[in-house]
């Protein structure tokens, strides 16, 4: 299924922007098994939309805490934005507390919480008809996964200094020629698996929803929308949990 | 054992005839058509089929263990549910790799 028109194409500046960018940035190449690239900017616009949504939510949350009179200690009684965001924050903190401990969890909560919220809302964008989910393209997912990968090593070096790279050599020094390729491959497999897991789940869900919507437009798609919400939440949780585990193994060398 | 031994000679004769007739007919076969699209199709189907088979078995075991744990201790169902979901998602990711290959291959048909 190729690219299909989204709501973004109704903006008057969409088509000129797309052609302008295609002239400057587009390139024709096929790599190995993948098909030829076709230039599209829908995933960038989707990501920008999620970014604007999250910034708006953050501002509203900050205002509601500042004007609540008690510094935000008591949650409001009804279901509102503040309760929803506090639930997400508790969920992510509870996920992180297991591998990392409470002190480290508080330190890395901004990173993992942002990843969780961004991936969650990008996945949920796939359920609204007329939007192309940004996480269903390898472009967004590889960016997020490589970000986590690079950050784990930066955090490891920041905690331990250059000695951090000695853990690639394994427990005994004469096992190093055997351990280094194994550790390198397992480290490279992490961003690959993170990005492809998210890509496969969300794009397959999107396509299955589209197929059933074309077949029986009346009641059956509701089941797939429910499944889509479940998959969106589970995939965001799994991405955040795995990122937490990778960061915690990178910084947790003190207890040897 | 005596009954099986009595069948041995007819069965051996049948197998040898079948194999040799395949060799005899092979010379008269039509020149092989270009099977690349068919092979790509079979490859895609095998990729997702085997992946789903292994994934289904693995996830069945994970869910069965989680249900056993909940049956033993119904109050721990909240603490068992989340690790079960995470385990299922990790097993499912291997199936997803097979699905990606199948999608790529059907795109090349």
Image: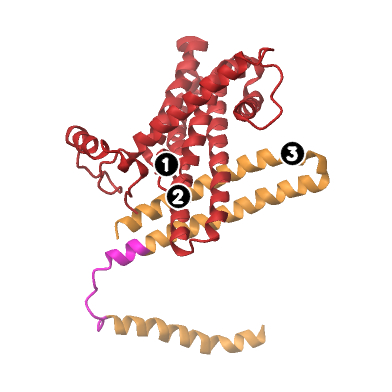
Chain colours: A red, B orange
Q: Are marks 1 and 2 in contact (CB under 8 Å)?
A: yes
Label 1 to label 2: alpha-carbon separation: 8 Å
- Whether residue A217 appears in this view of the structure is yes
In the visual, does B51 lie left or right of B27?
Answer: right
The reply to whether residue A184 is in sight is no
Q: Of the numbered discs in the image, which one, if any, rests on residue A206?
A: 2
**A228 above or below A11?**
below
Q: Nearer the viewer, residue B68 or A216?
A: A216
Where B38 sits versus A190, above or below? Answer: below
Provide residue B44's location: percent of width, then percent of height.
39, 59
Mark 2 residue element: helix
- Please give the chain letter of the residue carrying mark 1: A
The image's mark for residue A133 is 1
Q: How crowded is mark 1: few (under 14 residues within 10 Å), some or many (20 or more)?
A: many
Chain of the residue under label 3:
B
Q: Numbered disc 2: what chain? A: A
Sequence-wise, the earlier of marks 1 and 2 is 1
User: Which of the 4 image quarters holds residue A143?
Assistant: top left
Give me the C-alpha separation between circle 2 and circle 3: 29 Å
Image location of residue A16, percent across then percent down: 21, 37
Instruction: State the quadrant of the N terminus of chain A.
Output: bottom left
Q: Residues within 10 Å of mark 3 (few under 14, many from 20)?
A: few
Image-quadrant location for residue A132: top left
Front of the two marks 2 and 3: 2
Pointer 1 and pointer 2 on the same chain? yes
Where is mark 3, residue-wise? B78
Residue B33 located within the stretch drawn in magenta: yes
- Residue A226 in the magenta stretch? The answer is no
* Distance in Å between CA atoms under marks 3 and 1: 31 Å
- Pick whichever, A161 or B76, lies toward us: B76
Q: Main secondary structure of the magenta part?
A: loop
- Please state the extent of the stretch shown in magenta in the rendering: B27-41
């Amino acid at each position: 299924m190729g690219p299909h028109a989204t709501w973004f194409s109704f903006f008057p500046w969409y088509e000129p922007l797309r052609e302008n960018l295609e002239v400057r940035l587009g390139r024709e190449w096929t790599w190995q098994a993948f098909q030829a690239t076709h230039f599209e900017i829908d995933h960038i616009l989707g990501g920008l939309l999620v970014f604007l949504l999250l910034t708006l939510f953050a501002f509203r949350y900050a205002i509601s805490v500042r004007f609540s009179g008690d510094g935000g200690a008591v949650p409001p009684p009804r279901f509102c934005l503040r309760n929803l965001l506090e639930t997400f924050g508790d969920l992510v903190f509870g996920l992180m507390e297991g591998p990392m401990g409470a002190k480290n969890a508080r330190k890395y909560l901004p990173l993992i919480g942002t990843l969780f919220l961004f991936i969650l809302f990008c996945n949920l964008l796939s359920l609204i008809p007329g939007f192309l989910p940004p996480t269903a393209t390898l472009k967004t997912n590889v960016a997020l996964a490589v970000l986590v990968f690079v950050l784990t090593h930066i955090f490891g070096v920041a905690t331990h200094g250059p000695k951090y790279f000695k853990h690639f050599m394994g427990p005994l020094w004469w096992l190093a020629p055997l351990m280094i390729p194994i550790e390198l491959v397992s480290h490279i497999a992490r961003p690959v698996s993170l990005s492809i897991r998210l890509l496969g789940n969300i794009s397959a869900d999107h396509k299955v929803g589209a197929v059933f919507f074309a077949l029986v437009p009346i009641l059956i798609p509701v089941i797939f929308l429910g499944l889509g919400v479940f998959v969106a939440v589970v995939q965001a949780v799994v991405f955040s949990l795995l990122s937490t585990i990778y960061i915690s193994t990178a910084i947790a060398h003190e207890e040897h | 054992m005596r009954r099986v031994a009595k069948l041995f000679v007819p069965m051996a004769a049948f197998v040898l005839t079948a194999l040799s007739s395949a060799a005899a007919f092979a010379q008269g076969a039509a020149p092989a058509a270009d099977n690349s699209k068919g092979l790509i199709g079979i490859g895609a189907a095998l990729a997702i089929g085997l992946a789903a088979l292994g994934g289904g078995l693995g996830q069945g075991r994970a869910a069965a263990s989680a249900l056993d744990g909940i049956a033993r201790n119904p109050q721990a169902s909240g603490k068992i549910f989340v690790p079960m979901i995470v385990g299922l998602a990790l097993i499912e990711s291997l199936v997803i790799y097979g699905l990606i290959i199948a999608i790529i291959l059907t795109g090349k048909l």
